[in-house]
Structure formats: structure tokens, C-alpha cells
């Protein structure tokens, strides 16, 4: 870790479009940032998010996910080599094993598109709309062995309108995710 800046060396794990990665990169370049993104890892060669890493000259690597063990072993080596203090999952669509979490032994954050503990896992927006919920939202939480069950750092809700579909709700939630993730990082790192 860089002692001079006091910023946490951060790795961001992605699988897709990388819009949360983009907002984290933007935050990391601000004066008040508490993180330095030194590594972006994707399990998907075609993840659009890799473009954001390239544009910002952030070291990025694709690790093919043939099986969990080989993926996690390679990832752990990379994290160690880059002195990573914090992992941010940003649309990373694989589940990290309890073994990996234990070996990494530092904080792993995830952003989830629902108001946890409601709607863990996938298809959160459709489930919220089908159940006629009044609100949905996003949650930033610490990753533990159980899916979407770790300590909640921050949540923000959005109103679900009668006219909302899973798709329109997804767009609304994504907008708040981009603001929520940096705020959650600040809360996490200043409350330590």
C-alpha cells in the first residue's frame, strides 16, 4: 500500500458494461478519494468496462473462468502482487468462495441492485415489480460466505411507479448505484 497518499490500493472486478467501474474511476480521481484503483479484473474478455480501465491507464487483466479454483488462485496471486487492500465488485457475475474470502483476508465490497436483505441473487428488478413493491434500490455490502448477506454499509431507495417495468426500474437503480458506491467506500474507510 502507498503510505504517502494513504489511499487504499483497490481492485475492481467486473463482468460487463462497467458503469459502476466508471463511477469508481471518476471518484478515485477526486481530491477526497480514499482509494487508488490499481487493477481491474474481468472474467469476460468482451466486458465493455475494460475500455474504461484502458482509457484511464489502469492495469487490467482478463482471467478466463474455466473453474472457480484456478480463477481464484490466479486472482489471489494478482491481488498480492499489486498490494491490494480493497476489492470492489462492480457487476461481477461470479460468486467468490468462502476459501477465497478467507485467504484474501481484507475487505471485499459488492453493490447489489435491491434493498437487501430483499431479493438476493439475480432478477431483482423483475421480482420487485412483480411483487408490487413500493420501493427498490441499491445496497453496498461487505462480501461474506453467504450470497448477498454481508454487513450493509449503505442503501438508497427509489420509488417504484405503477408504470415501471423491470427494465425501467433497472435504469433508475443504476443511476443511484453510481452515487452510492463512492459514498459507501467513504463511510467504510472513515469508520474503520
Image (cartoon, helix red, strand yellow):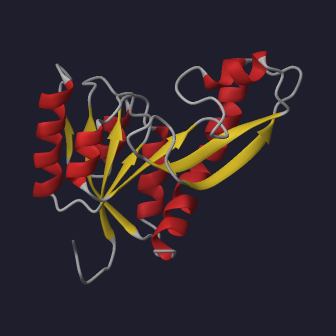
Q: Nearer the viewer, residue 119 or 181?
A: 119
Q: Nearer the viewer, residue 22 or 128?
A: 128
Q: Position of residue 91 (x, y in %)?
A: 44, 34
Q: Say whether residue 59 is visible.
A: yes
The picture quadrant where one finds residue 85 is bottom left
Q: Position of residue 13 (x, y in %)?
A: 33, 41
Q: In the displayed orientation, state which residue is furthest to the right.
A: 162
The picture quadrant where one finds residue 172 is top right
Question: What residue is drawn where x is 10% and y is 47%?
Answer: 77
Q: In the displayed orientation, state which residue is furthest to the bottom.
A: 4
Horizontal relation, residue 82 to residue 151: left or right: left
Q: Position of residue 170 (x, y in %)?
A: 65, 28
Question: What residue is drawn where x is 51% and y is 43%?
Answer: 111
Question: What residue is drawn where x is 18% and y is 52%?
Answer: 79
Q: Say whether residue 167 is visible.
A: no
Q: Position of residue 144 (x, y in %)?
A: 40, 45
Q: How many marks?
A: 0
Q: Look at the picture and state if 84 lies above or below 50.
A: below
Q: Nearer the viewer, residue 147 or 57?
A: 147
The picture quadrant where one finds residue 129 is top right
Q: Quadrant of the C terminus?
A: bottom left
Question: What residue is drawn where x is 37% and y is 66%?
Answer: 35
Q: Look at the picture and state if 31 lies above or below 169.
A: below
Q: Quadrant of the N terminus?
A: bottom left
Amino acid at each position: 500500500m502507498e503510505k504517502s497518499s494513504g489511499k487504499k490500493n483497490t481492485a475492481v472486478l467486473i463482468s460487463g458494461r462497467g458503469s459502476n467501474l466508471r463511477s469508481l474511476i471518476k471518484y478515485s480521481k477526486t481530491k477526497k478519494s480514499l482509494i487508488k484503483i490499481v487493477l481491474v479484473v474481468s472474467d469476460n474478455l468482451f466486458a465493455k468496462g475494460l475500455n474504461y480501465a484502458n482509457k484511464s491507464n489502469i492495469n487490467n487483466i482478463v482471467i478466463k473462468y474455466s473453474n472457480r479454483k484456478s480463477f481464484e488462485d490466479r486472482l489471489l496471486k494478482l491481488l498480492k502482487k499489486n498490494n491490494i487492500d480493497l476489492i470492489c465488485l462492480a457487476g461481477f457475475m461470479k460468486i467468490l468462495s468462502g476459501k477465497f474470502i478467507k485467504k484474501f483476508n481484507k475487505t471485499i465490497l459488492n453493490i447489489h441492485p435491491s434493498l437487501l436483505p430483499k431479493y438476493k441473487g439475480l432478477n431483482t428488478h423483475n421480482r420487485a415489480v412483480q411483487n408490487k413493491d413500493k420501493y427498490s434500490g441499491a445496497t453496498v455490502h461487505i462480501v461474506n460466505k453467504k450470497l448477498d448477506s454481508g454487513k450493509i454499509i449503505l442503501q438508497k431507495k427509489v420509488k417504484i411507479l405503477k408504470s415501471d417495468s423491470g427494465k425501467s426500474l433497472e435504469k433508475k437503480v443504476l443511476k443511484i448505484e453510481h452515487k452510492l458506491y463512492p459514498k459507501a467506500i467513504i463511510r467504510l474507510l472513515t469508520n474503520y
